[in-house]
Amino acid sequence: MKLDRLVASHQSLGRQAAHRAIAAGRVRVNAQVVTDGHHPVDRFMRVEVDGEVIQSPERALYLMLHKPVGILSATKDDQHPTVIDLIDDPDKHTLHIAGRLDRSTSGLVLLTNDGRWSKRIMAAEHKVPKVYLVETAEPIAEEAVAEFARGFYFHTEDITTLPAELVILDERRARLTLHEGRYHQVKRMFHRVNNRVTGLHRESIGSFCLPDDLKSGAWRFLDPQIAWAAVTSGDSLLLKSSSFRE
C-alpha cells in the first residue's frame, strides 16, 4: 500500500489532505519522517501522524525448520501432523511455507508471515537454487549427470526441466541442485534414468543452509534483517549463528 492511501483511510482526510500532511513532514514511518506519499508501507511498519499512531506494526516472522519424514508441509491437516504443529509460538497460525517438501522428504523448510519475502524465494523468475541429498535403489550411472544437465521433458505439463547439477557422491548417493520446484520433480527425474529415489533430504534453499546442530523436528527464528539480506544479496556467509535469534 502507498503511504498516502494509508494516511487518508485512517485519518479520514481524503487523498489531497493526506498528501499535504505527508509533504509537511507530519508523518513518520518507523520513527523516520517520510515526505513521499508514494512511499510503500506494509503491515510490519509503524506509522504516525502528528505523533498519533495510526498503524502499529505486526510481528514479522522468519523461521527455519528441519522437517522430519512423515510430517506434512502444510499449515493444517485433520489426519497428519504438519510443520506448524512442530512450532511453539503464539503467532504460528499466521505462517505460510516458502518451499514445501513431500511427506517422505526431510530437510530444510522456511516459514514466514511476510508474503514479499516468500515470493522473493519461490518466484520462478528468481531461479533460487535448492540442494538435495538423494539416495537411490540402484547405482547411479555416470551418464545421468549429462542427462540431468540437459533437462527432461514432462509431457503432462508440456515443459522441459531447467538444467540441474547432479554430483555423484558414491554408488547410490548424489547431491542434486535444482532451480525450480515441480511436483515430485526429483523422483520423476531419477525415474527417467531408470532409478528410484529411496531417500531425499533438502540441505539448502538459496543462501539458507540447514545447520548441522538443528536437529530433526527443531526450528529457529531468523533475524529479520539478515533474512532479507540473504534473499537480496545471496550471501551465504550471512547465515552464521548471528543469523538466528531466540
Image (cartoon, rainbow, N blue to C red):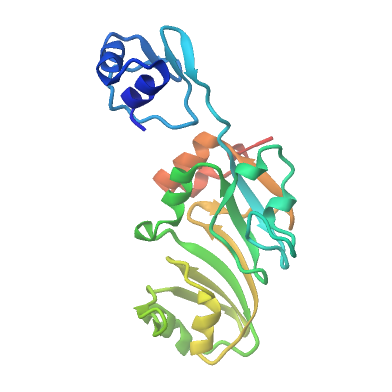
Picture quarter containing residue 158? bottom left
- Residue nearer the viewer, 42 or 224: 42
- How many numbered circles are shown? 0
Position of residue 29 measured from the top left corner of the image (x, y, whole percent) = 41, 20
Q: Which residue is at 58% across, 32% downward? A: 59
- Residue 213 appears in view: no
Position of residue 198 measured from the top left corner of the image (x, y, whole percent) = 66, 81
Position of residue 54 measured from the top left corner of the image (x, y, whole percent) = 47, 18
Q: Quadrant of the N terminus?
A: top left
- Residue 175 appears in view: yes
Q: Which residue is at 51% across, 38% downward? A: 226
Q: Is residue 27 left or right of residue 86?
A: left
Picture quarter containing residue 136? bottom right
Q: Quadrant of the C terminus?
A: top right
Q: Residue furthest bottom?
A: 194
Position of residue 212 measured from the top left corner of the image (x, y, whole percent) = 68, 55
Note whether 20 is above or below 73 in the view shown: above
Q: Is residue 87 left or right of residue 36?
A: right
Note whether 69 is above or below 206 in the view shown: below
Q: Is residue 39 left or right of residue 194?
A: left
Q: Which residue is at 45% across, 89% downward? A: 143
- Residue nearer the viewer, 175 or 69: 69
